[in-house]
Image: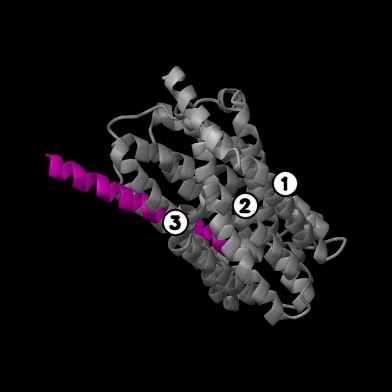
Amino acid sequence: MGQRGAFARKRAVGILFVAVLTNLIGFGIIIPLLPFYGQRMGASEVEIGLLFASFSIAQLVASPLLGALSDRYGRKPFLLLGLVGAAIGYVLMALAPSLGWLFVARLVDGACGGIITTVRAYLADILEESERAQGYGLIGVAFGTGFIAGPLLGSLLAQWGLSAPAWGAAILSTAAALWTLVGLPEPTRLRVTHPSLLQNVRQVWSYKPLRPFLLFDFLFWSCQAVYQTGFALLVHRRFGLGERHVGYLLGFVGALGVLTQVGLVGWLARRIGDGRAFRLGVIIAAFGLGGAAVMPSVPLFLLCLVPAAVGSGVAIPSLLSVLSRATPAAYQGGLQGVATSLEGLARVVGPLWGNGGMAFSPIVPFGSAALVLFAVGIVASQYVQRLTQVHAHTESISERVG
């Protein structure tokens, strides 16, 4: 019985891995192409930013509600809703006759297509505590792989027309939904994992040493959103590159980031600590983005993308580690909810900032993001020096709360 149970858990994790992978591949397919869709329908730079932001706004509003409903009615229906909703959003995008319908497609995709909250809750239901790190790590691999494969696949499909990548994403999501429907059982036990956002904010914000790190988290992910969503317009305006080239470049950047996280971050954190690794990664990314903002040719631009990708690859896991270490054990659940919400808000601010800045100059989006990242790196240094004291304080807080 134990072996059958272990096999069933592995099979469920495998299906969830594929569901997240296809969801992120679909997301990655659309990101490089959305500005070209918008331009074809006469959208301004600000309206293109709103197209990106509308997805995140819908996801930010819908995710807590869907999570709470899955606590009450089960995980599987809402996983299916997420996959089918994403497919519907992609079909609407492929068929959209106007900019208004394109906004509808993005809102539907954002409201229904954010499955990660339900996936994490499902894993918490079926995995023991000793198994969860590995399970969540596998989902992280799906994220990284999806962000690499999506832009590359979108570039390949774009040769058959601008709507072909959206149809491809819809087919992937539909196939994942069918496999989930047939192969994934409903968990036999449900753990309520969705306290209200207001409860999370009150709990986590009450712990003052954590506040600067939450600010760093928001600013860092806002700059990442500037980079990701402003990339296509930037290279199109400055170098005349189209949707196929944008996808290949983003795939290259994503691969560099994943390789950095796999091969460099652990060694660097052991040598200098996760706090200093975060600071170093942010500053390296700032120099890369700043250089990319002003380089006059494609080869030099590509050269600057290397430190931008490597720096972000170092900063992302290091920041997660810093946030976790600076938080008492009793507040870890609340931290994850608040951090996820902050990152969602950053994906609303970043596209408006980056694409809106393009209306003034192609230099503004990457240049301003580089300045903010550099400032974060400099200011973070004084808090990094306090990490040892903060960590000791978190342990005492955990003992008192526990």
Q: Seen in the image, is 59 located left or right of residue 181? A: right
Number of the front mark, 3 or 1: 3
Residue 168, above or below 196: below
Residue 339, above or below 278: above
Residue beneath label 2, please?
279
- Which of the marked residues, 2 or 1, is nearer the chain's N terminus? 2
Question: Which residue is painted at 42% across and 21% down in the image?
Answer: 399
Question: Magenta part mainly helix, strand or loop?
Answer: helix
Judged from this view, the residue extending furthest toward the left is 1
Q: Amino acid type of disc 2? A: Arg
Coloring basis for residues: one colour
Q: Mark 2 and mark 1 in contact? Answer it, CB < 8 Å.
A: no
Residue beneath label 1, please?
349
Residue beneath label 3, please?
266
Q: Amino acid type of disc 1? A: Val
Distance from label 2 to label 1 (Cα)? 22 Å
- Magenta span of residues: 1-30
- Which of the marked residues, 2 or 3, is nearer the chain's N terminus? 3
